[in-house]
Image (tube, helix red, strand yellow):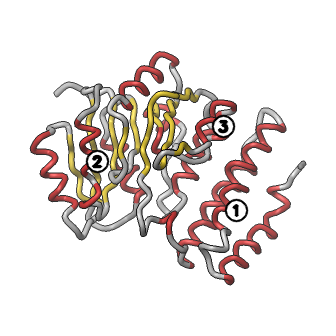
């Protein structure tokens, strides 16, 4: 079998009723030389059955079944290990992409020899602002990880993986690690990743105490990166602090999404770490 140019990695957990748009968009991609790696994270619904149905009409799909539910980070890392493409995309199975998304990102990343090619991130009829910020400074790539294509060799050589001990915000840790190892990110203005916000998704409901603790662990990861990294300029350091730490802290401390006790817990975290965050500012 011919080695694919791009591997699409999909962590799948109880998404049977939401997968059709993504798999339709993958089936209709203008670039055909891809593989689609589905890592089932011990689903309890008909997710595996749906994937097997998709395989009947698309032999580029490969299904891997994990023995226990381990979370999206492990599923993505597992998919990366199993991938054969020189370039990879980490998509979510309940969203979808433009039909020429893969082709445009592939042409851009290979032509410019970049580590990352990033498309726009669309929610409904609105584009999130991160894309425009990344165009101005690559260090602003602090969210929208699904909207990009990555050089697999670059990720592995720099140990840029999803942290498996973080159950929410793992993508933010992945991107913080990413920007500290590259300055080669190309942005694509005519390809869209379509994010579908559904009732019950993590960003649409209150955070449990367990989730708040996971957010704190995510922030701890970022704080450690800040302490260990030597930035080229003072401005770069400020951008990293603002985009990768303060913005994610403010998101986590949203009073509409957490209890009063958890809000106090996050504020305590900030007070205890304020010296590291505000060093030389």
What element does badge 2 sit on? helix
Quote the CA–CA distance across marks 1 and 3: 18 Å
24 displayed left or right of 156: left
Q: Residues within 10 Å of mark 2 (few under 14, many from 20)?
A: some
119 relative to 225, above or below? above
Q: Residue 280's x, y, as percent?
A: 90, 48
Nearest the camera: 196 or 60? 196
**Which numbered circle lies on residue 250?**
1
Query: Which comes sooner in the sequence, label 3 or label 2?
Result: 2
Given this view, does label 3 or label 2 mark the residue nearer the observer?
2
160 relative to 171, above or below? above
What element does badge 3 sit on? helix
Q: Residue at x 52, y 52 (%)?
A: 171
Q: Are marks 1 and 3 in contact (CB under 8 Å)?
A: no
Per the image, the residue denoted by label 3 is 133
Q: Residue at x 12, y 51 (%)?
A: 53
Q: Residue 101's x, y, as percent?
A: 38, 31
Quote the CA–CA distance across marks 2 and 1: 32 Å
68 displayed left or right of 229: left
Quadrant of the image occupied by residue 141: top right
Q: Residues within 10 Å of mark 1 (few under 14, many from 20)?
A: few
Quote the CA–CA distance across marks 3 and 2: 28 Å
Q: Residue 247's x, y, as percent?
A: 69, 55
Query: Which comes sooner in the sequence, label 1 or label 3?
Result: 3
Per the image, the residue denoted by label 2 is 21
Q: Residue 174's x, y, as percent?
A: 54, 48
Q: Residues within 10 Å of mark 3 (few under 14, many from 20)?
A: some
Given this view, does label 2 or label 1 mark the residue nearer the observer?
2
What element does badge 1 sit on? helix
As drawn, the residue found furthest toward the bottom would be: 261
């Amino acid at each position: 079998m011919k080695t694919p140019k791009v591997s699409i990695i999909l962590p799948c957990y109880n998404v049977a009723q939401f997968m059709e748009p993504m798999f339709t968009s993958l089936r209709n991609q203008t670039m055909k030389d891809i593989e689609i790696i589905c890592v089932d994270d011990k689903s309890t619904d008909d997710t595996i059955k749906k994937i097997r149905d998709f395989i009947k009409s698309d032999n580029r799909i490969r299904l891997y079944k994990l023995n226990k539910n381990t979370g999206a980070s492990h599923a993505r890392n597992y998919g990366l290990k199993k991938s054969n493409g020189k370039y990879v995309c980490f998509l979510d199975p309940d969203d979808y992409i433009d039909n020429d998304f893969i082709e445009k990102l592939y042409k851009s990343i290979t032509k410019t020899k970049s580590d990352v090619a990033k498309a726009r991130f669309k929610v409904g009829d609105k584009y999130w602002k991160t894309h425009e910020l990344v165009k101005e400074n690559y260090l602003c790539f602090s969210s929208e990880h699904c909207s990009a294509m990555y050089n697999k060799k670059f990720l592995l050589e720099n140990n840029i993986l999803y942290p498996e001990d973080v159950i929410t915000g793992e993508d933010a840790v992945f991107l913080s690690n990413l920007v500290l190892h590259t300055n080669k990110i190309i942005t694509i203005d005519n390809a869209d990743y379509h994010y579908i916000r559904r009732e019950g998704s993590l960003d649409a409901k209150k955070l449990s105490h367990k989730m708040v603790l996971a957010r704190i662990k995510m922030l701890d990861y970022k704080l450690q990166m800040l302490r260990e990294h030597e930035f080229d300029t003072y401005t770069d350091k400020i951008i990293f602090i603002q985009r990768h730490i303060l913005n994610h802290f403010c998101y986590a401390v949203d009073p509409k999404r957490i209890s009063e006790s958890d809000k106090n817990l996050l504020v305590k975290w900030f007070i205890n770490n304020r010296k590291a965050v505000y060093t030389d500012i």
